[in-house]
Image (cartoon, helix red, strand yellow):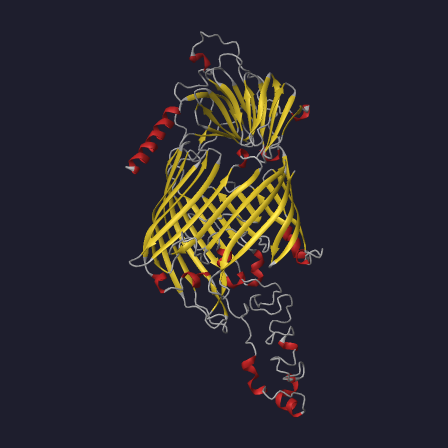
Amino acid sequence: MFIKKILFIIISLFIFSMVQADTVARVIKTTGDVLVKSTGQEDFATAVTPGMAINNGDHLKVGETGFAVLIYLDDKSVLKVRENSEFQFVETENTRTVDMKYGTIYNQVAKEGRDKAYRVQTPTSVASVKGTEFWALVSMSGIDQFMGTEGLFEVLNQISGQVVQVAAGQTAISNSLGNLMNAPTNPGALPEDPDPDTQTDTDTGDGETEDSTEPDSQDAPDSTPDQTPEPGQPETEVPEPDQPEEGVEGEPGPESAGRSFGMGLGIGSVTIDGQIYNQFALRPEFSFGKLGIGLDVVLYIDDKGNIREEEWDEASDFIDKFLYVRWAEKKDPFWFKLGALNSVTLGYGGLLSGYSNMMEFPSVRRIGVNMGVNMGKLGTELLLANVKDLARGGTLAGLRTTYKVSKTFPLTVGLNVIADLNQFSGLKDKDDDSYPDVFDDFVDDDKYFKDSDGDGIADEIDPDRDNNGYTDWIPGVMNDLGVDSITAAGMINDPFLTTIESRLKTDPFSTADVTARAFGFGFDLGYPVFQNKFIGLDVYTEFNHLQFPSTNSSGISYDGRKSTSGSGITIPGVRANILKSINLMVEYRIKQDYFVSGFFDQSYDLVRVLPFYDNDGNVKIRTRDMQLFADSTSSVNASGYFGSASADILNIASFSASYANMKADTVEFNSFFAQASINTDFIPKLSIASAYYMRNNDENPFDFGNPSENTILGYKLGYEVSKGVSLIWDFRQFYRDTGGEELEPVKMTTIETAFSF
């Protein structure tokens, strides 16, 4: 019954979208690169020609050297679209919307013969018009400009709710920070009309037929042919006119139309390495077109007024002051992001899903690299989780390559390769002496690492290493003279020297002695079954394989591991997007041997390698695979379902959740993740409200009273003291084995007063 209801909704939405695809405008003139993407198409594949019909829901894109002029059929309103522009035609019964993504458009809105409200909408602003002429300039950096040339119109900033009236000779400037202002128009900033000869026809009488709105017969054929090229045929561009239009070249594109700047100021407390510090932080963010830079300049001050020097004592520390540097978006030909990485997924997430290198921020600052190149049918994406780990033997690295067969048969083939080149580089080592802090008795001194008697003197320079009151060696001499000669000379008087080794610590675990690696590879196929403005439906399948090579033991701290491997298959997978606000995913999974879907997930850095205590009280370490596959039942073959859902509920709240259930004959593996946030615009004095909970690969992830090392939870709350000033509480918690009967919670709390400028 439930499936029938879903099918009914999908079919109804499809029929509704088809009914709505009516012709609303026609193209009068074009030059250069002008393309249209009709409802249901994934890419801009159709070249625009004069006389072409424009339907409700169509997207129009003008390239770097083109422009287009269009006329609405009912009221003769005219749109003049300049270079580097992209927008969508959206018509309802009572409203006509020009939905701009970026670019420059001159709107000549007819005063008569119009029965719909006219709006220009951007991600930041809405301009409502009754009958006027104005320019709309929309920058990708989040700055909108509306320049009035005739009449009066109203501009709304959707972030702050501010409204201004704009008259001829005035400019409204609106940005993504919620700011909106009205100022006199700078004459030099007014764009040049690319086609001054075409004007709005305001004299049309009521008795004029619809045919009279069409362009001349030689420009408008009776029927518009299908503009999609046949398979195997080269795509053609709109021919250039004999006389190119003036005033088109040399203008800035949408990326350079404006700049944005934001400043955050944080004052509060933070816990680093178990010590509480007062924090003073400046977090400016700059955006210059496609380039974005975020800084995190922080001073940590202890209870004695001393500034923590670890963040400022080396030249490399200044790199940490860059929170991120980004360029463009993933759909662009070239893009990258350096520094902080959040929610990185390769492909459909069978190997790497939702990875974040920020889980231990600010106590651990990682510098990640996520970049990609798109060249026609080919696409490539690269991930380096932390370039700092390269000096310690390796980091988590991933590479994805995709190939789309064609626009008419948009099957996408993907190949993923993932490798953690040294899982042990996840162990903290402050002095970089290869001895992790959990084993190092001198975490701030790279010369020493062992203190057997706990007297604060390293064994390498301690004459009485076992602290029994006798001198058992002479540092710097024993190696030259030998034990017998030194003893004979009366320099060593420990009568228990022959058994001293049993009272001394063995050399601790060193990352220089052993390396643990994890590898994964996979391939996937994906196909968009159905796409329109209301719903998108994709199907896919993927195969993934994990390999964990064997490693040798290293003293009592690491027992080594045997070689293990496993595979997973998803067939089928279904992914849907409904009304651009609801995302659904369902998969049927099959697991063989030692495999876990999404092995490299959001919590990976927290569980990459962990210490634990054995029955004798010795500290040992286990890599993530050793934790997950410690039980002999973990290698049994299993199958089951995975489902996830996320939604934006009327712009009031958003949530996402996922659940996986894998079963064998007598074994069951379950995973659960949930996250929710509230739009605080509707709640006075609340500036931030979000929470999350994650527990993967446990028998019962809903046993909240008995957490495991796979449990992570947190929340973030902000109380607005006054406008632009908030008190923010950021809390994270996970669990570790410290040798007791129960796991100990590790709590990370940051409290700060944040100022937004």
Q: Quadrant of the N terminus?
A: top left
Rendering coords of residue 32 (x, y %) = 53, 29
Q: Nearer the viewer, residue 254 or 183?
A: 183
Q: Is residue 318 left or right of residue 333?
A: right
Look at the image and tell me whether residue 68 can be seen. no
Q: Position of residue 290 (x, y in %)?
A: 58, 39
Q: Position of residue 397 (x, y in %)?
A: 50, 55
Toward the viewer: 17 or 84?
17
Query: Residue at point 71% right, 57% down?
Result: 304
- Residue at image position (49%, 48%) is 344
Q: Is residue 457 left or right of residue 22?
A: right
Residue farthest to the bottom, as pictured: 488
Is residue 560 at all visible to an observer of this figure? yes
Is 641 placed above or below 73 here? below
Quadrant position of residue 136: top right
Q: Is residue 566 left or right of residue 239?
A: left
User: Residue 353 placed where, x, y %?
Assistant: 45, 50
Marks counted in the figure total 0
Which corner quadrant of the image does residue 249 belong to? Answer: top right
Note whether 118 is above or below 6 in the view shown. Answer: above
